[in-house]
Amino acid sequence: MAGIFKAYDIRGIYGETLAEDMACDIGRAFVTFLKCRKVVIGYDMRPHSQGLFDALCRGVTEQGADVVDIGMCSTPMSYFANGSLGADASIMITASHNPGEWNGFKLCREKAIPISGATGIQEIERIVTSKAFAPKAAKPGTVSRKDIVPGYVAHVRRVADLKRPVRIAVDFANAMGILEARCLDGVLEMTRLYDTLDGRFPNHEANPLKLDTLEALQKTVRRGGYDFGVAFDGDADRAGFVDEKGDVVPMDMITALIASSLLERQQGVIYYDLRSSWAVKEVIEENKGIPKMSRVGHAFIKQQMRDNNALFAGELSGHYYFRDNYFTESSAMAVLYVANAITHKGQSLSTLVRPIQRYAASGEINSEVHDAAAVLQSIRRRYSDGRIIELDGVTVEYADWWFNVRCSNTEPLVRLNLEARNRKLMEDKRDEILTLIRAG
């Protein structure tokens, strides 16, 4: 059990730190904690997901709650099911982009509100560890089956507004994007890569943040005739994009592009995570939207979106959140909004993105440190003449450059993101701050 209860989900190696007996206990603890009566449960294509589902259902129903089994699905589909079916809670069985031996659980309250470490996972861990379950119900709950895919497909397709046919290449990495992309069937013309479900990930890791996983997609797009390419992660709650030339489009540039497409239809608040380019805020303002900065992490972003009824939020890791999907991710919606944008503007993806890439960015750079708190304090002192924002770690803004330094939620690392008005200034300041960080 050691270490499986994490900041945003429960995740472990099947057969070592996570197995059926633990899944049953987590089900019992989940109902004990939430006192829920109707729980939506879905799962991904990993070979052990079905067994964990059966055990989890046993724990949930032993406590008297009913299960709505939505079967194999993407994580965005599970969020949609939670909201659209009026459930009290939901659990998605997945380990996202982790290798095939991993599995886990993403937990939500009603309306697809996520449960994080601070808002319930720690308490569920305590209940499991101490066996402090509520008494088993005199009458166990029931399990009913619901095919959520057709409803989700119809729900997502409503955002499609294409002015011409669009052709894309899609890398599914043998994972849940295969189901997520049913929303795109018949709407976009697709060339499909690795489109057989296989939870062993035989071709490559399902993680579009790792550029080597995009090589097959890039090679396909560079053969010509495509408007863009997209790669889904393991549970399809993230997506990475390449343009019509096969070049990787930074995920904050996709945030800006989707924001501009959405704002054509309606005005409102749009969030961008604090690692995003200054250009994202500028594009939102140029399109008469209201930009707001969010801290990193889906639980924080979703809460901020709810608090301000935001239309959309984008995260540098490739999560794209929509009010229209209960303030949660929908990678298929993201793909359709990108397609909408290129057909409405009558320009290629690379042409649309080029003017948004206004600054030089470092990308996220990780450093292992002994005392992260001391590092952050030394940065506050050294850069006290800048505009300091303490939303997540330390962000400091100057007229020509800015940076954020924050601690990882999951690893003993400090992460630096920095941007400047030209490459030389970016490189000089990047090296200056990395020296300060690594001296600590």
Image (spheres, rainbow, N blue to C red):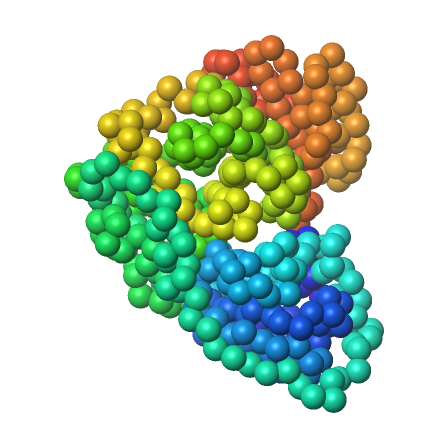
As rendered, which of 236 and 80 lies closer to the eye?
A: 80
Can I make out residue 432 in this image? no
Q: Is residue 86 above or below residue 135?
A: above
As rendered, which of 248 and 341 lies closer to the eye?
A: 341
As rendered, which of 58 and 384 lies closer to the eye?
A: 58
Q: Tell me residue 208's x, y (percent).
A: 42, 47
Say left or right for 91 vs 62.
Answer: left
Q: Tell me residue 291's x, y (percent).
A: 56, 27
Can I make out residue 236 in this image? yes
Quarter residue 403 falls in: top right
Residue at horizontal 44 percent and vertical 55 percent from the top: 236
Say left or right for 92 vs 234.
Answer: right
Q: Is residue 299 above or below residue 25?
A: above
Residue at horizontal 42 percent and vertical 49 percent from the top: 331
Q: Tell me residue 387's x, y (percent).
A: 70, 17
- Report the quarter where the C terminus lies: top right
Q: Is residue 433 above or below residue 386?
A: below
